Image (cartoon, rainbow, N blue to C red):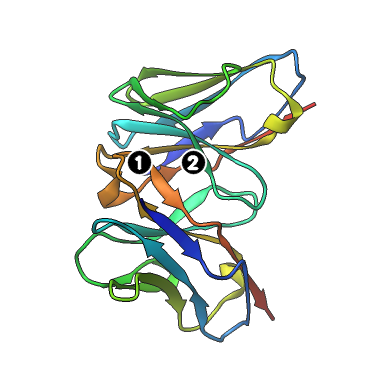
Amino acid sequence: AQSVTQLDSHVSVSEGTPVLLRCNYSSSYSPSLFWYVQHPNKGLQLLLKYTSAATLVKGINGFEAEFKKSETSFHLTKPSAHMSDAAEYFCVVTSDSNYQLIWGAGTKLIIKP
Amino acid sequence: DTEVTQTPKHLVMGMTNKKSLKCEQHMGHRAMYWYKQKAKKPPELMFVYSYEKLSINESVPSRFSPECPNSSLLNLHLHALQPEDSALYLCASSQQDPKRDGYTFGSGTRLTVV
């Protein structure tokens, strides 16, 4: 069975410092993985995706993530945080079903001025 | 057009009301989804339509009734809801294989049941 664990419920960083949001997954096959972002009172936006091509994936707004099969991780990073990055971030893994995705519990990113 | 459009953005309804949520996409996606999201939680899948046919119903109470009139439209009919049904309702669409591209989400309808 597939599962995904976001290791931090909240992450707080100062503006201009690096961001690291951690995600570990469990899968019986080679999954696809996604990071979605949700700003307050908004819908969900796809940040980036891994689908068995390059293991270092670049997304929108300067975010990137590295798929590490040996560590079963897909951590999200950004070199320099901006106030507009404050949001909820979800790590998502594909399941056996064609349509269902497995969602992490979310990490709230707080940016301090 | 790379958007999923949901209307209304906000809805307040009484427990005896009947209302509908609407979702529209023009990306040629053949799978469409309804999700429910409570505060500070990830979204929970409710229904999946594939090629306009209901493929997945995640044991959702019958007071929620989905409808897919055509490949671009998805409705969610609401009747006799309970206060605990208050949530953000998200519509999404995908290519036939979302494992490759993921979903495209709308901005949601914030539903309050009074």
Q: Is residue B5 above or below residue B53?
A: below
- Indicate the position of residue A89 as horizontal and vertical percent values: 53, 62
The chain identifier of the residue carrying mark 2 reads: B
Observer-side mark, 2 or 1, equals 2
Residue at disc 1, secondary structure: loop
- Indicate the position of residue A61 as horizontal and vertical percent values: 44, 69
Task: Work out which residue is located at the far bottom of the displayed protein and give it.
Answer: A17
- Residue visible at 36% across and 50% down in the picture: A1
Residue named by callout 2: B106
CB-based contact (under 8 Å), mark 2 and mark 1: no
Q: Which image quadrant is residue A49 in?
A: bottom left
CA separation, marks 2 and 1?
13 Å
Please state which amino acid type lies under the numbered disc 1: Asp
| Mark 2 surroundings: few (<14), some (14-19) or many (≥20) residues within 10 A | many
- Residue visible at 50% across and 57% down in the picture: A104
Q: Is residue A28 left or right of residue B46?
A: left
- Residue visible at 52% across and 40% down in the picture: B44
- Residue visible at 59% across and 49% down in the picture: A42
